[in-house]
Amino acid sequence: MAGFLNRARAARLMREAQLDALVLMQPETVRWASGADPGVAASWRRAGAAAIIAPADPAAPLAAVVGDLQALDFQARSGIERVRTHPIWVETSELSAADRAGDWRAALAKQSARRPTTFDARQAIGHISELLGALAKSRIGVEESFLSVADARLVRDALPGATLIDCSSIVQRLRIVKHSMEIEWLTLAASAAETGLRALLAALRVGMTTAEMTRVWREAALAEAARLGAPQPVSAWAYIAVGEDGFAPGGPARPGDIIKIDVGCVVNGYSSDGARTVVLGEPSPIAASIHHALLDAFLAARGELKPGAPLSRIHARAMEAMRDAGFPGYSRGHFGHSCGASIWSEEWPFIGADEPTELEAGMVIALETPWYVRGVGGFIIEDQFALTDRGAKSAWTLPHELIALPA
């Protein structure tokens, strides 16, 4: 099995929820569970383009549904033997050696089939019932957070005898504990992003625009990812803000400007997340006070990053530090999040006041203490941490203090 689905952990969570199987259809989940590309049909983000069927019995094999264009590659990469295919819009045919030596036109004509405009979701979802077999009339977990109202109706129609239960939270709990390879990709992505930030700090000057800053950072980050041998695809994102607005790009940079630099690299679908704050010249007393308070809050929360710590307690420690610094009105919904392979850099769980989830070894968490103060600037301190049995290891080595550069 090439994917990262922990069948023993999944079996325990399914047993607690009294589920007999999971049907996973969100493209990111399919890729995570199988280790294979769910195919171009998944780009439409409709149910049925690709699916993984995971019985509660960890000894029972996984099964999959995928578009016919990617089927052979999917089966080879995932190691899943029971794969059902459905036609997509791309014409695919096959010619054997005998066909090529004979009447190859006739051989191709026999294979011709009517193609859908994109793919037939009803037909694709119908394969799920077939693969479930006897389990099709049991309690089935589906990712309701992904299903549109129309797609949910198709799933219910395809599984009329099943009791469908939302398994979105189970999938989230399965994905928060990372495989060692996932941690390696996230760490590599963070290292490339930090190298890019160091290059930007060396080049940053008065008059520079946010577009120029982003270009310098991105080129250095992607070059470092290539040097490290990062598996493709590799991309990069940046939220850089200059000046008093705090969140809007702003710029060009002027003496005294606060520059918020929040960046990440995406390696093989896994996005890092880290940030620092820069000032050109000497910071104003207000800016210095704000950043110092955020640093105290970051360090207070950092001290709680250990297995067994509830995320709500980490949030409480950061809020307490901000109040102690003289900012009782400061309010932040969350101070960070899990990192992984989602459509954004932030994944559940969040370091929020009402989040009881406890940290576990194998999680990768981004801890951040931001504040956007219009009239002064945007401030942020953020590191990505890998949780181990002994504590938390940061993926960045840059200091957390306000970085003062010559104006």
Image: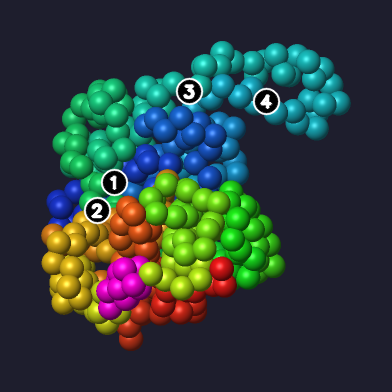
Q: Which mark is residue 93?
A: 4
Please tell me whether mark 3 sits on a helix, a strand or a loop.
loop
Label 2 secondary element: helix
Judged left or right of residue 220, residue 36 is left
Question: Disc 4 versus disc 3: distance between alpha carbons?
Answer: 17 Å
**Residue 289 among magenta residues:** yes
Residue identifier under label 3: 119
Q: Nearer the viewer, residue 16 or 80?
A: 16
Vertical side of 211 occupied by 293: above or below: below
Mark 1: few/some/many CA within 10 Å (<14, 14-19, 20+):
many
Q: Quadrant of residue 161?
A: top left
SS category of the residue bearing label 1 = strand
Say which label, 3 or 2, has the lower sequence index: 3
Looking at the rendering, the stretch of residues picked out in magenta corresponds to 285-296
Q: Mark 2 — residue?
A: 170
Asked whether the beta carbons under mark 3 and mark 2 sit within 8 Å of each other, the answer is no
The quarter holding residue 115 reads top right
| Distance of label 1 from label 2 (alpha carbons) | 9 Å
Q: Are marks 1 and 2 in contact (CB under 8 Å)?
A: yes
Q: Residue at x 46, y 73 (%)?
A: 282
Residue 149's x, y, as percent?
Answer: 25, 26
The residue located at (15%, 53%) in the rendering is 17
Alpha carbons under labels 4 and 1: distance apart: 32 Å
Residue depth check, mark 3 versus mark 1: number of the one nearer the observer: 3
Q: Using a 10 Å C-alpha cutoff, classify the residue at mark 4 as few (fewer than 14 neighbours), some (14 to 19) or many (20 or more).
A: some
Instruction: Determine the main secondary structure of the stretch shown in magenta.
Output: helix
Q: Amino acid at mark 2?
A: Ile
List the residue tagged with mark 1: 22
In the rendered structure, which disc, 4 or 2, sits on the residue that comes first in sequence?
4
Magenta segment: does it hold 109?
no
